[in-house]
Image (cartoon, rainbow, N blue to C red):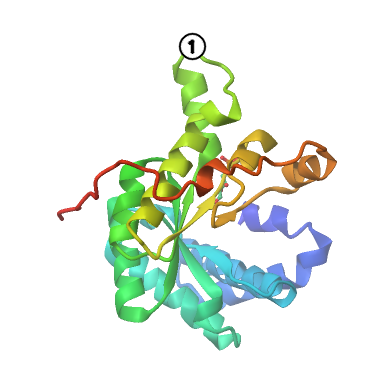
Amino acid sequence: PSLLLSAAKMDQYNHILKEAINYGSKVGNTVNEKVQEAIDYLGVLFGCEILKIIPGRVSTEIDARLSFDTKKSVAKALKLIQLYEQMGIQKERVLIKIASTWEGIQAAKILEEKHNIHCNLTLLFSFTQAVACAEAGVTLISPFVGRILDWYVANTNTKSFEPEKDPGVISVTQIYNYYKKYDYKTVVMGASFRNIGEIKALAGCDYLTIGPALLKDLEDDDEPISEQLSIKSAKSTDIEKINIDE
Ligand code: E4P
């Protein structure tokens, strides 16, 4: 409730927040359920607002506490899509955002195969997770460039990396090249950037998600992006195709 109340101070969205709180209190039975219903509904209402402005798709995340429960993740995703559809939004415009745990990846596989619901697999920090997502046929992955860098900075003696040697950039480049070489339909959206060097090094990736501060830095940056986009050297990976056994 405190989360909702502090958010409700944002005047611009007051009506949306009130609507979500009202919905949650009607639909939930216990206090916890009422709050969770309100939070889910709020995500969908904000998603609808964004879809009024942009032509593309919006991601809506399922409750992170369901990350290790395939069945509950599928049920929650179906519920979110149902709410979108009740508001007149087609499911093609929504990506259900799910953590890239094994259980989350299996939930995405069911949603994509059985329900034709598209998924964005988040909290992705490794090549192994990326291969499992592609094998599961998910629509999109969000590898976390900056979180990989954070780990290296915290756990090695190297405190700063040139963009080409940035471990987050190297990881996304490897994933991207592997996907293209083996013709996976899953697309890569680089996320969690720490500086514009990382963004420029990954220019040419399928998608990048960039926060407002770094977008401003990019706007102010005069250095041109190299025409030799390292990420575009598709099919350059020498990694053999990996098969994932359940
Ligand atoms: C997106 O889903 C993530 O929440 C975001 O990109 C993570 O960024 P951060 O590592 O800067 O928190």
In percent of width and height, residue 1 lies at 61, 57
- The amino acid type of the residue labelled 1 equals Asn
Instruction: Using the image as rendered, state which of residue 28 and residue 12 is in the foreground.
Output: 12
Residue pointed to by mark 1? 157
Q: Is residue 177 above or below residue 164?
A: below
- Residue 9 lies in what quarter of the image? bottom right
Residue 76 image offset from top left, x and y in percent:
41, 70
Give me the residue at 74% from left, 73% from top.
Answer: 53
SS at circle 1:
loop
Q: Please state which of residues 65 and 4 is positioned toward the viewer in this rendering.
A: 65
On-image quarter of the C terminus: bottom left
Quarter assignment of residue 43: bottom right
Which residue is at a point 59% across and 51% down the rendered structure image?
204
- Image quarter for ligand 1: top right
**Few, some or many residues within 10 Å of mark 1 (<14, 14–19, 20+):** few
Instruction: Note whether residue 142 is visible.
Output: yes
Residue at image x 48%, y 82%? 82
**Residue drawn at (31%, 41%) of the image:** 238
Residue 134 shown left or right of residue 168 in the figure: left
